[in-house]
Structures are given as C-alpha cells and as structure tokens.
Image (tube, rainbow, N blue to C red):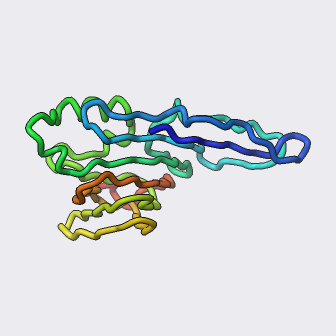
C-alpha cells in the first residue's frame, strides 16, 4: 500500500512549507494474507503543538499503532474479503505473527478466543474510503458501512468484517484516551 503523504508546517519565517512529500514510510502489504495492507500515516504525541518554527518530527517509525492518552494516530487499512481467511491454505498462526510484528500495539489488543474482536483506549473515527465493511459489536449486532460512511467508537469492543466479495479500504483516526472505571473491556 504505497500512499503518498505530504507533510506541511509553518517555518520560522511564518510561511507555510512542505516538509516532506513521498511514500508514507510505515506501510506493509502482508505476505500471509494477500490483499491485507496497513499504513501508519502520522503519529502525534500527547498535547502536540503547532506554530512557526516548531520541529515537526515524524514519529511514525518509532510509535506503536495505538496512541497513549492525548496522542493520535492516522492509519489506512485495506481488508481483503473475509472468505480469504476461510481458504484451506490460510495460516492463522503465521498471519498473527506477521500482524504482531508489523502492527505493534494494536496487535496486542486483539482477543485470541474471538478472532478480530478488540478494543483500544481511544476514540476512533473510522471512514470507509472504498468498498463495504461490517462493524460487529460484542452483542452480535452488525452494522454495514459503505463508501464514505463513518463510525465513531468510544473504546468499545468490536471487530471489522469484510463480508463482501471485494477488497475494502478504511481510514482510521485514533485519539488516545484514558479508560474510565476499572479498565475492564469485556
């Protein structure tokens, strides 16, 4: 998933300038699940600042995929149809290992006993850019989202399913939060 990423900021002279323009450096097309691809496009720390002359560091190579409280992540994911994972040649263990290696922080949020189900300490803005995805909640409810439709989630337990016959691409903005209460998710 080669995605062009343009980063702009205000220089010390007060004028806007392009800091970088090229392929987002943290992208992966998975070998163990053809058609599955991820890209961490940008990462901010807690309480980021903007203004003239500030150092705008690209943190995407160092940060995990789930933000700490106050931090954010911007990522894009392409999902192949779920039917690909039902094929006899699909190796779930190999995919899990590759996912853990390529998507640190998020991989640990996934439940072993309930494939795809996870929750993060974040408010998520989830946008279907292309195709159709199904948001599955822990009570079994399924909500179909199509191109340009949005889900907003508040740290809830869920899974994304591509029940269609073609790939789907989503853009995710995660805003790190603190979890209220005892932290239990299930």
**Up-down: is 49 above or below 148?**
above
**Up-down: is 53 above or below 74?**
above
- From this viewpoint, which residue is outermost toward the left? 88
Q: Quadrant of residue 156?
A: bottom left
Q: Quadrant of residue 180?
A: bottom left
Residue 72, horizontal then vertical, whole percent: 54, 49
Q: Residue at x 65, y 43 (%)?
A: 6
Task: Judge whether residue 152 can be spotted in this image.
Answer: no
Residue 88, horizontal then vertical, whole percent: 8, 38
Rendered-image quadrant of the N terminus = top left
Q: Residue at x 51, y 55 (%)?
A: 175
Task: Identify which residue, 178 or 2, lies in the foreground.
Answer: 2
Q: Residue at x 46, y 54 (%)?
A: 171
Task: Identify which residue, 21 or 12, lies in the foreground.
Answer: 21
**Up-down: is 90 above or below 179?**
above
Task: Judge whether residue 105 can be spotted in this image.
Answer: yes
Along the horizontal axis of the image, is 12 left or right of 33?
Answer: right
**Up-down: is 142 above or below 4?**
below
Q: Quadrant of residue 91?
A: top left
Rendered-image quadrant of the C terminus = bottom left
- From this viewpoint, which residue is outermost toward the front? 166
Along the horizontal axis of the image, is 126 left or right of 20?
Answer: left
Residue 82, horizontal then vertical, whole percent: 21, 51
Residue 133, horizontal then vertical, whole percent: 31, 61
Along the horizontal axis of the image, is 93 left or right of 9?
Answer: left
């Amino acid at each position: 998933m080669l995605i062009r990423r343009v980063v702009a900021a205000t220089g010390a002279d007060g004028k806007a300038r392009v800091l970088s323009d090229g392929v987002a450096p943290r992208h992966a097309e998975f070998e163990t699940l053809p058609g599955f691809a991820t890209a961490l496009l940008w990462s901010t720390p807690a309480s980021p600042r903007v203004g003239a002359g500030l150092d705008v560091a690209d943190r995407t190579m160092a940060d995990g995929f789930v933000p700490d409280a106050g931090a954010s992540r911007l990522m894009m994911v392409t999902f192949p149809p779920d039917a690909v994972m039902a094929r006899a040649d699909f190796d779930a263990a190999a995919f899990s290992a590759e996912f853990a290696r390529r998507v640190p922080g998020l991989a640990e949020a996934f439940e072993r006993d309930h494939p795809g189900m996870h929750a993060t300490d974040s408010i998520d803005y989830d946008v279907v850019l292309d195709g159709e995805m199904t948001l599955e909640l822990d009570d079994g409810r399924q909500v179909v989202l199509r191109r340009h439709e949005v889900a907003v989630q508040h740290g809830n337990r869920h899974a994304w399913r591509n029940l269609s016959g073609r790939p789907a691409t989503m853009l995710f903005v995660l805003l790190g939060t603190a979890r209220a209460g005892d932290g239990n998710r299930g």
